[in-house]
């Protein structure tokens, strides 16, 4: 089964932290090549965030903090290669389509190698620049197994835990309405 990463947006933060956020569902590649010939010290803050932790969406050339492992067909894979090659020529100055296709094929093969996980596995990247070279570390985020008898949405982290009170402790009662009236009276007198 062929698998490739797609961008995913779990919250709107990508739209704030990157200059351009990838649209959810775009085919994605690592995108480290964007920073291959640049000095990290000269990058703006949002560019540094993309360098540190972004996947490149190939249609928008926007960034995504996370990608998701997705099944793909051979036709889709070929389309990803061609689209990325077109972007390499038009946006990154590749000298010719033949060279761009070879580079795109390499990038897509690397992206596919990251997807050696079950579909729907979330991928994250962390990049550093060490001795002038970009180093990438990838990690996966997998959904936890649901506990027996519970649904997947609510089985992991309950918002509240209820405990029985043991012993003869007096019940605590608070009159919130009375407290607010007392506070207003004090404020009026001051």
Image (cartoon, rainbow, N blue to C red):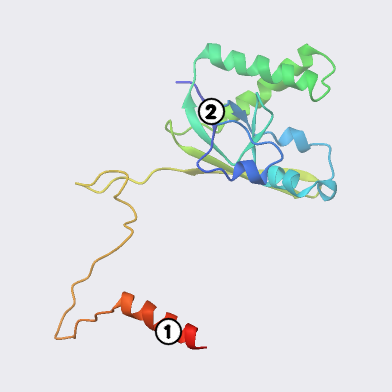
- Which residue, as the protein is rendered here, is positioned at the far left? 168
Q: Position of residue 142 (x, y in %)?
A: 42, 43
Pick the front one: 30 or 92? 92
Q: Relative to 78, say whether 172 is above or below.
A: below
Give 181 or 24, whichever is nearer the viewer: 181
Q: First in sequence: mark 2 or mark 1? A: 2
Residue 98 shown left or right of residue 123 in the figure: right
Residue 185 image label? 1
- Mark 1 Cα shell of 10 Å, populated few (<14), some (14-19), many (≥20): few
Q: Residue furthest front?
A: 189
Residue 107 visible at all: yes
Depth-wise, is mark 2 or mark 1 nearer the camera?
1
174 and 61: which one is in front? Answer: 174
Left or right for 49, reference 161: right
Residue at left offset 82%, top offset 20%: 94
Neighbour tally class for label 2: few under 14, some 14-19, many 20 plus, Cα within 10 Å: some
Q: Is residue 146 above or below residue 69?
A: below
Q: Secondary structure at mark 2?
A: loop
| Quadrant of image for the N terminus | top left
Answer whether residue 53 is visible to the viewer in this image. Answer: no
**Label 1: element kind:** helix
Residue at the (38%, 83%) spot, across then down: 182
Q: Which residue is mark 2?
A: 25
Question: Residue, x 33% and y 52% (percent of image)?
Answer: 156
């Amino acid at each position: 089964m062929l698998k490739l990463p797609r961008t995913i947006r779990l919250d709107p933060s990508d739209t704030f932290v990157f200059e351009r956020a990838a649209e959810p569902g775009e085919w994605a590649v690592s995108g480290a090549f964007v920073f291959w010939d640049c000095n990290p010290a000269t990058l703006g803050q949002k560019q540094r965030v993309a360098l540190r932790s972004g996947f490149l969406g190939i249609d928008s050339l926007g960034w995504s903090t996370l990608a998701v492992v997705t099944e793909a067909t051979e036709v889709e894979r070929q389309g990803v290669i061609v689209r990325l090659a077109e972007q390499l020529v038009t946006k990154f100055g590749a000298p010719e389509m033949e060279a761009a296709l070879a580079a795109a094929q390499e990038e897509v093969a690397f992206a596919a190698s990251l997807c050696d996980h079950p579909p729907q596995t979330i991928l994250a990247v962390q990049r550093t620049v060490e001795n002038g070279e970009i180093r990438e570390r990838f990690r996966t985020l997998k959904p936890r197994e649901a506990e027996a008898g519970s649904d997947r949405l609510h089985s992991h982290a309950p918002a509240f835990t209820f405990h029985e009170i043991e012993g003869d402790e007096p019940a605590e009662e608070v009159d919130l309405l009375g407290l607010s009236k007392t506070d207003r009276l004090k404020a009026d007198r001051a």
